[in-house]
Structure formats: C-alpha cells, structure tokens
Image (spheres, grey):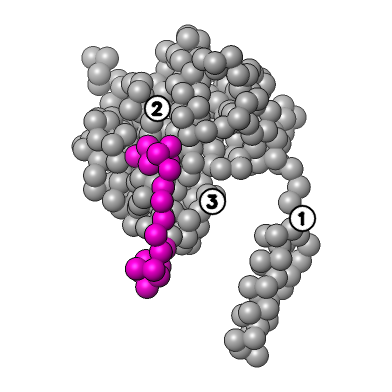
Amino acid sequence: MKGAINIVMFCIGLLLLSACQSISISEKHFLYPDDSVTQDQIDRWGRQQQLEFIAINATDGTKLKGALITRPNARFTLIYFGGNQFRLESQGGELAKIMSQFENNLLIMDHRGYGMSQGSPSIGTLQTDAVDIYDYVKSDPSLGELPVIVHGLSLGSMVAGHLAHQRPIDGLVLEGSTTTAQGLVDAQVPWYAAPFIELNISDELAGIDNLANIENYSDDLLIMVGENDQTTPVSLSETLYQHATTASKQLFVVEGKGHGNAIKSEAFSARYEAFVRGVLLAKTSEAL
C-alpha cells in the first residue's frame, strides 16, 4: 500500500506542475497478486520442463527451500539469486519463465529467512548459503556436470560475487549490482548533502565488496543495469566493469529500464543468449 500511495502522490505532483498533464491511475497500481511458479504454468510454456520444489540443508542445519526447473538435454545450469524481499511464491512465475528460456536448468532459492526458507538472514549467512547451494548443484551429476552460470540481482549480486570468489563458476551475471557498501551509500547521497552527513557503516556491511570479489575472476562476466536505475545507478556497474580483470567481460546498460526489471527488456533475450554462447564456447575450448 505504501508503494501505491507513493505512486498516487507522485502523479498528483505532476498534475500540479502542469495543468496539461493527464495521468491514468488504475487498479494495477494498487493490486499486486502473487506470481508463483507451478507445473501447470510451466507446461503452458511448451518447453518440456519439469518443476521440483527442493530443500537444501545449509552448513549450520538451516533448511533452505526453492524451485528447480529441469529440461532434457539442457545446455547449462543457471543458479539465480534474487534481490532483497524476493520470494519465490510471490515473484517466481514470470522470473522462471524468462530465466529458463535458454535451454537450461534453473535453480531459484529463497534467501534464508525469506519465503519458504528457514533461519534469520545476515550478509555472512547469505554468502555461506550460496556456497552450500552451489555445492548441492555440483553434487548432482545431472546439474553439476554441465557448465554453471550464476546470476545475482541487487542483494543477490553481492551473494553471487562472493560465490564466484569462493568456487569455480563458468559464467557470472551481476545485475543491478553495487561495488561496495560505501559505494552504494555514496551513490545514494546527493553531492550537495554529502558535506553535512556522516554515515557509519557496520563491519558486516563494510565486508560487502564486489570489486574484490571480481578481482581474480577470470571467466565470462556480464554486468547488467537499467539505464534509469536509481537504487544501484549505472555508475556503480561502470566501476565494476572497469575494475574487472577478466578479458571476457561485458557491460549491458538496458535502455528504458530501472532497478530489477532489466530482464523484461526486448533486448534482453538476445543479449543473454549471446553471453551464454560465449560461456559454452569457452567451456568447450577448455575441454579440447
């Protein structure tokens, strides 16, 4: 409801600025139905995919839950880490459809303490959970013997970056990512306010450092961000791209999109498929 109020107030503000403005407000601005993923829904996509809800025991015994979508003759396995507040049951349907279109297996887990997963989240536990999830994938020959690509959005990009630092992955996608906690804070504070604000970042948050995570990453890297992203501005992704040492890196600034909706761009599928082909080609070259 808070989001709907903000939309209405923004619209009213625009109307006050100009008597010529006409803005339509409909019930879609107030209603946010759940978007879960089901086998019936997957069958309608016509891709011969199977859905399985799974549980993974984290190192400390916490039960993490999520959805695994598999298909015959998959080319790779994709592990997806969502953003803050992501919950599979309410946001998984469209996401799963988009991210499983590349002839791939797809694993989406609720973060610890979110949705179906147990426990209380912290940056440290989310990072160790990511390693446990990766190890689960690698322990299953049908998943782990394929190339593994890891995709993280926003909060999930911090988790994905940490995982790339801890385990060998074949492709890394950082979407709507930050550089460091300090970098994110600096990007949010207007330049004219900075001299008057002193912000103290906790040690736990100070440990977030995707610049360090990708420093020694040498495989395929795709950095994505919406050109209108106000949460993690384009400048942060540009800094990540410049800092990355891998020769196989790409920066994809998605026209007309904001934070968290870059994958809904018309240009996304073709660009992502090209990235996947690069990952698979590199993996094939290694095997020769």
Q: What distance separates the C-alpha of mark 3 from that of mark 2? A: 23 Å
Q: Which residues are magenta?
A: 189-209
The x, y position of residue 104, in whole percent, is: 50, 26
Q: Quadrant of the C terminus?
A: top left
Residue shown at the point (63%, 19%) measured from the top left: 63
| Residue 211 position (above or below residue 198) | above
Left or right: residue 45 versus residue 127 is right
For disc 2, the marked residue is 163
For disc 1, the marked residue is 31
For disc 3, the marked residue is 261
Q: Which amino acid, mark 3?
A: Asn
Residue 174 visible within the image: no
The x, y position of residue 263, in whole percent, is: 51, 47
Q: Under tag 1, what secondary structure?
A: loop
**Overall secondary structure of the magenta stretch?**
loop
Q: Quadrant of the N terminus?
A: bottom right
The x, y position of residue 254, in whole percent, is: 43, 55
Q: Nearer the viewer, mark 3 or mark 2?
A: 2
Q: Earlier in the sequence, mark 3 or mark 2?
A: 2
Q: Earlier in the sequence, mark 1 or mark 3?
A: 1
